[in-house]
Amino acid sequence: MGMHNMQDNKKIGLMWWLMATFTILLGIVIQARVPEEAHNISRFAGVLTGMGTGILVVIVINWLVNRFSTPEKRKLRQIEKNDERNIQLIRAAYTVGAISAIIILAIMVMLFVLLEQYVASYIALGALYVEAIVVRVAYVILGKRM
């Protein structure tokens, strides 16, 4: 079981590296191709580059912490990570986060409609649907695994 988790962690780590690199490169490519007068697209490219860089910084910091930790500290962190109480706390925190996201998105839809910002309300409504679909799909997939 321990080896399986290590392989999963490596896959997840690789996914984060790829996502960070892709986001940075996408921001750079968009910035290079956008006309000078398109300030909103330029800002969007900057946001992408900043997000990708932020993800990359977190990855590097985590790697450095793990790399230069003593074996005892690494083992202690692994024990804490696998502790049933911590697992339940993480699940509860994610549940609260998901419910909060759904409520916030629903409120945003209503506020955007009241402000007559219909495109923004459609975007928030789409995000609300995506959130609900992700929760349902995760429930079905996890139900099959457990």
Image (cartoon, rainbow, N blue to C red):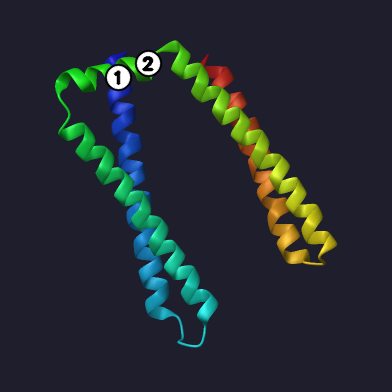
60 left or right of 29?
Answer: left
The residue that appears at 37% across and 16% down in the rendered structure is 82
> Mark 2–mark 1 contact, CB under 8 Å?
yes
Question: Is 54 displayed left or right of 69 in the figure?
Answer: right
Q: Could you say where residue 119 lies in the image, as x and y percent from the top left?
A: 73, 65
x 34%, y 64%: residue: 25
Front residue of 140 and 5:
5
Q: Residue at x 42, y 73 (%)?
A: 30
Position of 130 with respect to 28 (left or right) is: right
Query: Which residue is labeled 1 in the image?
Result: 78
Task: Please provide percent x and percent y for residue 114.
Answer: 84, 61
**From the viewer's perspective, is residue 145 above or below residue 42?**
above
Where 79 falls versus 49 (above or below)? Answer: above
Residue found at x 39% / y 61%: 50
Q: How far across and down, in percent of the image, does residue 18 sit?
A: 33, 49
Amino acid of disc 2: Asn
Q: Quadrant of residue 6?
A: top left
Dot 1 amino acid type:
Gln
Q: Who is closer to the viewer here, 53 or 23?
A: 53
Dot 1 lies on which element? helix
Report which quarter residue 129 is drawn in: top right
Kindly state the secondary structure of the residue where label 2 is placed: helix
Question: According to the image, label 2 marks what residue?
Answer: 82
